[in-house]
Image (cartoon, rainbow, N blue to C red):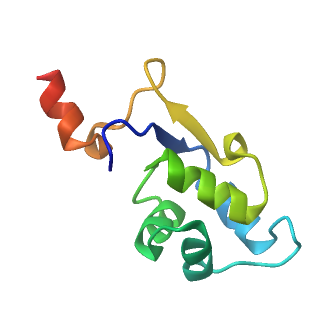
Amino acid sequence: MSPSEPVYQLVNRDLLKTLMSRTGSGQSVTIRELAQRAGCSSTVVGALVSGAKQCVVASTAHGIARVIGVDTLILFTPVGRSVPVPRRETPVSVVRAAV
């Protein structure tokens, strides 16, 4: 994760699952297909779907939204000063810089 790349938090994993079952093209997409087409690993997408992961870098959020066929802000919200990153998902470089 690049320290300069913004982080996005998934708004609702049930919405992600629903949109995966019927994308903008009307077709469903599997975790593996979504990951491949979005340019990220299936582990990341699977963790988002399961709730094990809540945050991804901007490029991943944009890729997932693009494949599903919705605006990024339908699925994700930017994490910044007003929306804190959950501690367990804060990049190590950010934690070290804050200390």
Above or below residue 47? Residue 82 is: above
| Residue 35, picture quadrant | bottom right
Q: Is residue 99 left or right of residue 46?
A: left
| Residue 7, picture quadrant | top left
Above or below residue 45? Residue 2 is: above
Above or below residue 9? Residue 83 is: above
Confirm whether residue 74 shows in the render: yes
List x then y, in percent, for residue 47. 44, 65
* Residue at x 41%, y 72% (from the top left corner): 43
* Residue at x 38%, y 34% (from the top left corner): 85
* Residue at x 79%, y 59% (from the top left corner): 69
Q: Is residue 36 left or right of residue 99?
A: right
User: Which quadrant is the C terminus positioned in?
Assistant: top left
Confirm whether residue 14 shows in the render: no
Q: Is residue 57 left or right of residue 25?
A: left
List x then y, in percent, for residue 34. 61, 73
Give the camera-side residue of 54 and 26. Answer: 26
Q: Which residue appears farthest toward the top when viewing the image? A: 82
List x then y, in percent, for residue 71. 75, 46
List x then y, in percent, for residue 59. 52, 51
Q: Is residue 93 left or right of residue 74?
A: left
